[in-house]
């Protein structure tokens, strides 16, 4: 019995040794897969878009000193991308766009000097009644797209055409509205006229940008669970390189379980990837930033804790190629008279001292987001 057991142990040892040697010297399939996965992961890290939204008008109009301070804070956050509006005023009847070229030009130059990629939002007054009935949206969109991409050719990597296009064409809630409609998923009803106007604007912007800067990429953005309209726009000729999505704490803390109500949910990250474009979370934040609605006060932990949970959730899907915070800086009430609850959206608090100078102070969420960038970039 002991002799048999000894023989079995010897045979087992021989088999184990053979398996180790085979794996080491002959079987390269697992090693190749591991190296391949590692290469893909490293490539994703290198190309991942880490960003935040800001504006050259962020505080009190365009002030050179304030803009320089913004750049300093942007660099400190370690992001590689900044999302900004093409600042302009639109005059209706007759339609005219007046661009703030001094502010736009200066801010773009500062960002490029600091090696930041730029997402520039080009937006018309899409849903104003004056730009729907009897108005050539495609021509107006073309002129805006051509202007931006010609003026900033080689400086702007991404142009976002309009903002949250998913909500623009929803049927107005006004009971007096009687125009034609069509239904999308989840019984959402859309205005036919608004959709036609939206499509015209986007087609025009897309054409103007593509003709003027062939290297530039186009972004369209959406929100909630309204991916139906993205599908329809693509089928009707809009061809974005990136689909951006807004996600706030009201949307939950798991993008793979997007709540639809009544116990129903779906994987939004997977659904958006079906369109075959890169997917970004183009606006991420706790709702109202650091202002906690339930406590009716500023609460930095509330904002920081949301990012601690949500950023890993997005990264670990393997389906999200970019995360941008909305927004980097608070827009204080002294800047535009907004309600207190709407003044805490940023990762950076903005105030004024007794001398009237603008003072910036980073919040806990600023450090949290920077730490997460470092964690997932190394």
Image (cartoon, rainbow, N blue to C red):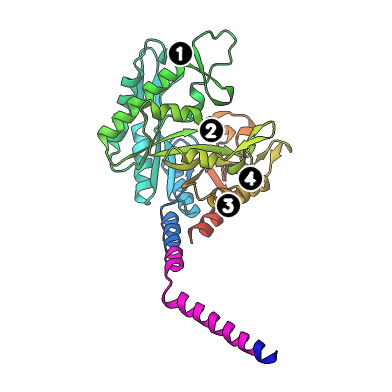
Q: CA distance from mark 3 to mark 2?
A: 20 Å
* For discs 3 and 4, the disc positioned in front in the rendered view: 3
Q: Is residue 177 above or below residue 28?
A: above
**In whole angstroms, how far apart are the C-alphas of marks 1 and 2?**
23 Å
Q: Give the SS element for disc 1.
A: helix
Are there few (<14), some (14-19), or many (20+) residues within 10 Å of tag 1? few
Query: Closest to the observer: 6 or 325?
Result: 6
Mark number displayed over residue 129: 1
Picture quadrant of residue 11: bottom right
Q: Which mark is residue 223?
A: 2
Closer to the camera: disc 1 or disc 2?
Answer: 2
Residue 145 is tagged as none
Task: Kindly state the secondary structure of the residue where label 3 is placed.
Answer: helix
Residue range highlighted in magenta? 6-35
Q: Is residue 185 above or below residue 9?
A: above
Residue at 53% from the left image edge and 37% from the top image edge: 246
């Amino acid at each position: 019995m002991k002799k048999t057991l000894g023989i079995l142990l010897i045979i087992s040892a021989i088999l184990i040794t053979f398996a180790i040697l085979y794996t080491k010297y002959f079987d390269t399939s697992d090693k190749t897969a591991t190296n391949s996965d590692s290469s893909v992961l490293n490539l994703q890290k290198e190309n991942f878009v880490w960003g935040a939204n800001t504006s050259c008008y962020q505080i009190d109009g365009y002030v050179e000193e304030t803009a320089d301070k913004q750049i300093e804070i942007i660099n400190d956050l370690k992001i590689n991308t900044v999302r900004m509006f093409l600042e302009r005023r639109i005059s209706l009847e007759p339609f005219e766009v007046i661009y703030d070229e001094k502010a736009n030009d200066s801010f773009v130059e500062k960002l490029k000097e600091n090696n930041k990629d730029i997402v520039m939002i080009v937006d018309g007054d899409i849903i104003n009644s004056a730009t729907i009935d009897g108005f050539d949206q495609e021509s107006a969109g073309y002129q805006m797209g051509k202007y931006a991409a010609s003026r900033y050719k080689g400086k702007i990597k991404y142009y976002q055409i309009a903002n949250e296009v998913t909500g623009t064409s929803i049927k107005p809630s006004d009971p007096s509205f009687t125009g034609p409609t069509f239904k999308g998923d989840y019984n959402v009803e859309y205005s036919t006229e608004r959709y036609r106007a939206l499509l015209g604007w986007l087609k025009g912007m897309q054409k103007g940008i593509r003709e003027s800067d062939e290297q530039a990429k186009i972004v369209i953005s959406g929100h909630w669970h309204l991916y139906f309209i993205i599908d329809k726009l693509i089928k009707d000729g809009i061809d974005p390189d990136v689909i951006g999505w807004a996600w706030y704490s009201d949307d939950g803390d798991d993008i793979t379980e997007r709540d639809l109500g009544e116990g129903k949910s779906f994987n939004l990250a997977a659904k958006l990837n079906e369109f075959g474009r890169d997917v970004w979370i183009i606006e991420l934040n706790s709702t109202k930033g650091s202002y906690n609605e339930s406590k009716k006060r500023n609460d930095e932990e509330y904002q920081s804790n949301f990012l601690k949970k949500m950023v890993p959730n997005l990264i670990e899907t393997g389906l999200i190629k970019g995360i941008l915070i909305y927004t980097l800086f608070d827009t204080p009430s002294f800047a535009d008279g907004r309600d207190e609850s709407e003044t805490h959206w940023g990762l950076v608090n903005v105030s004024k001292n007794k001398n009237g100078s603008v003072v910036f102070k980073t919040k806990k969420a600023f450090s949290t987001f920077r730490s997460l960038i470092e964690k997932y970039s190394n």
